[in-house]
Amino acid sequence: MIRARTFLRDIRGAMAAEFALVLPIMLLFLFGIMDVGYYAWAINQGEKATQMGARWAVATNLVPADLYDYSFAASGEVPQGTPVPQNLFPTVTCDSAGCSDWGYDAAAFADIVSRMQDFKATIQPENVQIDYDWSGLGYSGDPNGPDVAPIVTVRLIDMEHRPLFGLLIGSVDLPEFAYSLTSEDGEGTISN
């Protein structure tokens, strides 16, 4: 009976028991903080890859291949030296399957994807979409390049993130990334 009372009043192992109760919660927070940081890193990689893809797209060959040599003045639609109206240059969307108009330069698209993969290796060609939108810049019959200088928007779509310790939740969708610049060269004589 005396031993039972002594045993019940003995507090020497109380700290170890309390630590055992708190340790799983501490580890959960620690791993959670690491996963949030890793997710932020993945977002940063996606943003930088998209920015560099757009930079590459405006300084190298146009993905809609026929756009570079097309003359709105020679086609008779727009007088020489005037801006190309928006209705004659609708948005052109290019992805791994091709462009909605103006032909398709698969090598130019692959070069952009490859440049983006330098910043985020998990990017696949089907995750990249490039839009060429009317900007009002350029003029019909330009002898030094394309008649239009479109706004080029590179999008990174349908990307997933796999957390470090997220065995129970699987993967998490990353947001869509988009970055736009105005086309500079269109032929890539220097940048290619």
Image: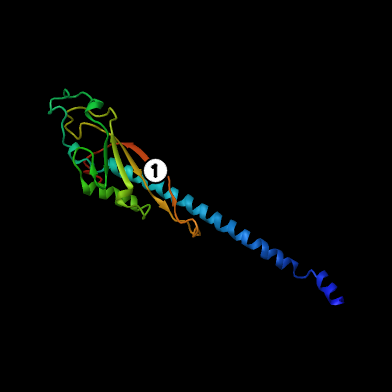
Q: Residue furthest front?
A: 1
Q: Position of residue 52 (x, y in %)?
A: 35, 45
Q: Callout 1: 10 Å neighbours few (<14), some, many (20+)? A: some
Q: Is residue 57 above or below residue 10?
A: above
In screen coordinates, is 122 left or right of 168? Answer: left
Q: Quadrant of residue 7?
A: bottom right
What is the quadrant of residue 138 in the picture? top left
The percent position of residue 127, horizontal first and vertical second, equals 33, 48
Q: Is residue 192 visible?
A: no
Q: Tell whether 170 sits left or right of 77.
A: right
Q: Position of residue 27 (x, y in %)?
A: 59, 60
* Residue name at image x 48 percent, y 51 percent: 39
Q: Is residue 155 above or below residue 42?
A: above
**Residue at mark 1:** 177
Residue located 51% across and 55% down the image: 35
Q: Is 169 rendered above or below residue 131?
A: below
The image quadrant that residue 13 belongs to is: bottom right
Q: Nearer the viewer, residue 61 or 27?
A: 27
Residue 11 vertical placement versus 104 (above, below): below
Q: Amino acid at mark 1?
A: Phe
